[in-house]
């Protein structure tokens, strides 16, 4: 718990990003496995959208030594989320269920799971937080 408290104190934007992504990963798994179209799915879905939007917006303020004003290639994924998320919501509202399902599934696996695996690699900032001893790979 101490590393998270330090993270909150030293880098609050990273903390908010991490908490929103952890929530999105957990809730996204529930949504993908649950019954679609019911009121529960809609309420949880809007919560997931809010978590993803929070994660995407906070990521713009997380900068390192990337080639574009401190932004790295992973921020291209952030741009993709910022474009795809509202389109996926719009698809659901217009009854285009297949397009909605496809976009949301791709967002979950790409923006939550794949990006999360990359972010948590030993040697990266959050990877060092989670794996302080580098998984013995160093």
Image (cartoon, rainbow, N blue to C red):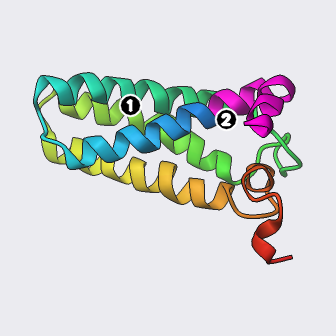
Point 37% across, 53% down: residue: 106
Point 44% across, 24% down: residue: 50
**Quarter where residue 119 is shown:** bottom right
Observer-nearest of 44 and 6: 6
Residue 62 x/y as whole percent:
76, 36
Observer-nearest of 122 and 111: 122
The mark that comes first in sequence, 2 or 1, is: 1
Mark toward the viewer: 2 or 1 = 1
Q: To which residue does mark 1 refer?
A: 48
Q: Is residue 11 magenta?
A: yes
The secondary structure that most of the magenta stretch takes on is helix
Q: What quarter of the picture does the C terminus occupy?
A: bottom right
Residue 26 x/y as whole percent:
41, 42
Observer-nearest of 16 and 56: 16
Residue 93 visible in the picture:
no
Q: Secondary structure at mark 2?
A: helix
**Quarter where residue 78 is shown:** top right
Point 80% across, 55% down: residue: 128
Taking the image as shown, residue 23 lies to the left or right of residue 62, namely left
Q: To which residue does mark 2 refer?
A: 59
Q: Secondary structure at mark 1?
A: helix
Residue 16 x/y as whole percent:
65, 27
Q: Is residue 132 above or below residue 50?
A: below
Residue 85 x/y as whole percent:
40, 35
Decide: few, some or many residues near mark 2? Use Cα within 10 Å; few <14, some 14-19, many ≥20: many
**Quarter where residue 56 is shown:** top right
Taking the image as shown, residue 135 lies to the left or right of residue 54, namely right
The part of the chain drawn in magenta is: 1-17
């Amino acid at each position: 718990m101490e590393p998270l408290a330090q993270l909150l104190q030293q880098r609050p934007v990273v903390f908010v990003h991490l908490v929103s992504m952890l929530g999105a990963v957990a809730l996204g798994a529930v949504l993908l496995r649950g019954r679609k179209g019911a009121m529960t799915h809609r309420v949880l879905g809007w919560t997931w959208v809010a978590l993803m939007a929070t994660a995407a917006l906070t990521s713009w303020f997380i900068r390192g030594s990337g080639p574009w004003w401190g932004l790295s290639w992973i921020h291209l994924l952030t741009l993709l989320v910022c474009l795809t998320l509202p389109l996926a919501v719009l698809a659901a509202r217009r009854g285009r269920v297949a397009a909605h399902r496809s976009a949301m599934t791709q967002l979950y696996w790409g923006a939550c799971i794949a990006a999360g695996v990359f972010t948590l690699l030993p040697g990266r900032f959050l990877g060092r937080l989670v794996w302080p001893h580098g998984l013995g790979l160093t």
